Image: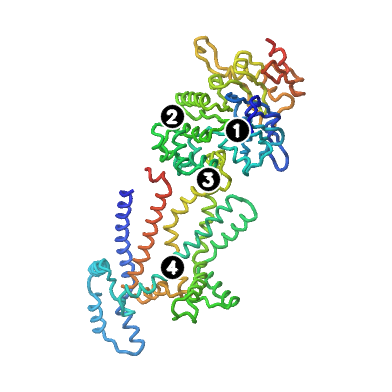
Amino acid sequence: MTASPDFPVLDVSGLSIALDNDGVQVPITQDVSFSIARGEVLALVGESGSGKSLTALSLLQLLGHGLSVVAGQIQFQARDGGRTDIARLGRSGHAIEALRGARIGMIFQEPMSSFSPIHTIGAQIAEVVEVHEKVGRKEARRRAADLLGKVGIPDPVGALDRYPAQFSGGMRQRAMIARALVCGPSLLIADEPTTALDVTIQGQILELLRALKRELGMAILFITHDLGIVAQMADRVAIMYSGRIVESGPVRDIFRHPAHPYTRALLDAVPRLGDIDRGRRIQPIAGSIPNIFEVPGGCRFHPRCPVAVLPRCAASAPPRHSSGRHEVECIHGETELAP
Amino acid sequence: MIRFLTRRLGYMALTLLLVSVVSFVIIQAAPGDYAEIYAAKKAATGAVITQADIEAMRVELGLDQPVYVQYVRWMWNALHGDFGMSWAWKRPVGEVIAERLPVTLAIAFATLLFMYAVSIPVGIYSAVRRYSVGDYAFSILGYVGLAIPNFLLALVLLYWSQQYLGQSVGGLYSPAFENAPWSWGKFVDLMAHLVVPVIVLGTSGTAFLTRAMRAAVLDELDRMYVLSARASGLSPMQVLLRYPVRTALNPIASTLGWRLTYVISGAPIVGFVLALPDTGPLFLNALLNQDMMLAGAMIFIYCALTIIGTFVSDVLLVLLDPRIRLE
């Protein structure tokens, strides 16, 4: 079976995740939809607690205890495979395990703890190859060394027999990327891969991811709260707030014409060069993201929103407006999206 | 690694020397000596023992020398493999111990094997199925096991197996096999007799190790690297065995040293209660009789086994955990 060229690698629609709280389903995310095409980078942006990391975990059926996908589809199409609705797969079993690490790679925020401290880096990368492909230990190690070289680790063959403690944070994140890509996945999910790193190392890792994307042609779902990284990395952006995607669109449109007041607030919270000279201060967003048990009615952002129209915003969910690929959920959407 | 081993071996030799001094002093600390006790026993049977006889015996045994001379002489001979004569047995100490030590060692190792073979899988199960019925059942069993004193458990099991299974559990062999040549039947008989001592000696250790293993695995289950291994496509069983269990084995392996100590120091009482032909009753009698050469050698051997156990667990830990190796 060959992949149809016009179908995206990942097409998520209406995805809702809920937490089982003593039999009561508490919604965590609602009606999340996005898609990523081959070779495209989609940034999923939001504050801590917005549900972006859980959305990422749900794509691999890795949600923790009590959490589950309660609605929606996760259509995945690998380069060399048929389409699968991951939302319908179990948490374990061959179907999902064959996707994890092989067709969809994932890297995490904590390069310090993402490797077991008592196994060598080489063993932990080679095992991914051994689990997914019928190759011997030697060939798996050769592949692991190959990838370690690709992610810029000096002396990759020697590095195979070293332990995570002998690697710096940046090197470990490189090794993590090697582990996620060793089987040549069609999609890479990167959950805040640079948050725990020094700024200079961050830049190197982002540059590496861009280069690998060009070389290997995989799609990337990049999860971050840092709009600076979004500007460098992403083709398109989805802004998440309190479990919903409130605005999405191509990076240029979002940065030039942010349509949602939350997106504008996020952009205002980003420091820029020259701010001090011009006497501009960073504008923090007032208030904090709602607790999942106390989600406000109507538009979830209205208590923090500077342009909320009361009582309308508190009474009913905001309408969705779109202009081309730029979409927004806000009562001001129509006027904001107008060119 | 070589440096670590030599340093560790050096410490071991030093500890053994200290232990030999301590064991010698302990024996000396008891009131009276072998000559007096021997005289008292002879007198009780009606023999006439004069003070001169006692003195002569002291000179013969070297008991008239200062303590440090006695110690040095003892140590010197021990280094040459001669632990002296057992005064009570009228035979070389080495010979007396050699007859019974293999039994003690067999029971100790069977007990260790039992403890680890039971506690590791049960601990893993309890951690993975935390707060399940099975976990609670094992927890209760474990607390009971921890609370029961060895000798009481020995007596209860002795009574039960005699009463309900009709099996003689005292000693190591049934009367039928006592002097029979080795055969499959005798081996099975021996194994059946080992069950009770192993359970008695191993119960509280098993209970403790199960708790330790459960806690260690629980500690590892929520680690980031476990999630990361799952995200790499490993099945739940592969993840469990390769990562959390493998990591949790380190603290368990490090307990081997003092588990061995525990088993060996518990053995004399159990051996006595179960009438086993091991070193337990031998040791107890040697202490009661102030059969100094024998008692000293026994204490020394028990301590040496403990120190060796600690050494083995240290080496195991270094082999298992690269973080220690790297320092």
Residue A152 numbered mark, or none: 2
* Dot 3 alpha-carbon crowd within 10 angstroms: few under 14, some 14 to 19, many 20 or more: many
Quarter where residue A57 is shown: top right
The chain to which mark 2 is attached is A
The chain to which mark 4 is attached is B
| Mark 1 to mark 2 CA distance (whole Å) | 27 Å
* Dot 1 alpha-carbon crowd within 10 angstroms: few under 14, some 14 to 19, many 20 or more: few
* Dot 4 alpha-carbon crowd within 10 angstroms: few under 14, some 14 to 19, many 20 or more: some
Depth order, front residue of A283/B134: B134
Q: Residue at x 45, y 30 (%)?
A: A150
Amino acid type shown at disc 2: Gly
Depth order, front residue of A292/B242: B242
Q: Are marks 3 and 1 in contact (CB under 8 Å)?
A: no
| Mark 3 to mark 4 CA distance (whole Å) | 34 Å
Q: Is residue A219 above or below residue B304?
A: above
Amino acid type shown at disc 4: Ala
Q: Residue at x 49, y 49 (%)?
A: B246
Label 4: which residue?
A: B106
Instruction: Indicate which label's residue lies in the foreground, 3 or 4.
Output: 4
Label 1: which residue?
A: A80
Q: Secondary structure at mark 3?
A: helix
Residue A76's x, y, as percent?
A: 64, 32
Amino acid type shown at disc 1: Asp
Q: Earlier in the sequence, mark 1 or mark 2?
A: 1
Co-location on one chain, circles 4 and 2: no
Label 3: which residue?
A: B220
